[in-house]
Image (cartoon, rainbow, N blue to C red):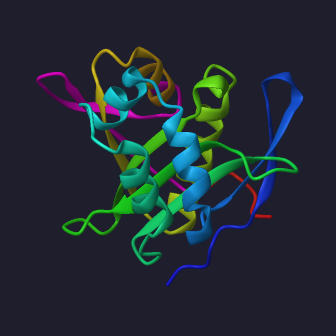
Amino acid sequence: MPDSPKAHEIVIAGDERLVVRPVRPEDEAALVEMLARASAGDIRFRCFAAVKDFPHLLASRLANIDPRRETTLIAVAEGSAALMGVVHIVCERVQPDTAEFDIMVRPDHQGHGLGYRLMQEILNEARRRGLSAVEGYVLHDNKTMLQMAQELGFKRIATEGEVVRLRADLGPSSASEA
């Protein structure tokens, strides 16, 4: 089983300091609170449809992972338990060297660079785990996510209906390990 990534501080727009760390099962209630703030549009972009009891179902899923196949990182406000964002990868069963990502940022932190930083963090974690690629599925009208993914090196590899499949082939990590 891979080592857990280490907690560390990041700085986003407005010099806001957040701590990025692996999720723990006891973070489930804070995840519910963060996810309950999601707009209908946020949920559609994340799940491609409305989901009944979205906060509880997703929080449970993200907080109780199989660490051999998954990593969930959260961004927590410094000095509090308030979650501002979450990013997750899960290794594919058919292609164990490839992971699928998902991400969500609290509405009041969207547009502050947190999503971009969390994606950088999870791509670095995927490299640290020795994965060869990270893929994701994004609705074609989620322009912000598509732009961010392109800036992070993702390529469009397929489009099916309203969904774009993205892939980032990973090379050696250029980030230094703390």
Residue 152 in percent (x, y) is at 52, 33
Could you tell me which residue is drawn at 51 percent across and 69 percent down? 129
Residue 57 in percent (x, y) is at 36, 54
Please determine whether, in this image, residue 166 is positioned above or below residue 94.
Answer: above
Residue ranking furthest to the bottom: 1
In the image: residue 35, left or right of residue 26: left
Could you tell me which residue is drawn at 31 percent across and 30 percent down? 138
> Which one is in front, 65 or 56?
56
Please determine whether, in this image, residue 35 is positioned above or below residue 12.
Answer: below
Name the image quarter holding residue 69. Answer: bottom left
**The C terminus is located in which quarter?**
bottom right
Residue 165, magenta (yes or no): yes
Could you tell me which residue is drawn at 30 percent across and 69 percent down? 96
Residue 35, magenta (yes or no): no
Residue ranking furthest to the front: 53
> Which one is in front, 60 or 1?
60
Q: Which residues are magenta?
A: 150-172
Name the image quarter holding residue 159. Answer: top left
In the image: residue 162, left or right of residue 88: left
Residue 19 in percent (x, y) is at 78, 51
Residue 113 in percent (x, y) is at 67, 27
Residue 86 seen in render: no
> Which one is in front, 46 or 95?
46
In the image: residue 51, left or right of residue 6: left
Residue 102 seen in render: yes
Residue ranking furthest to the left: 161
Name the image quarter holding residue 109. Answer: top right
Could you tell me which residue is drawn at 50 percent across and 41 percent down? 35
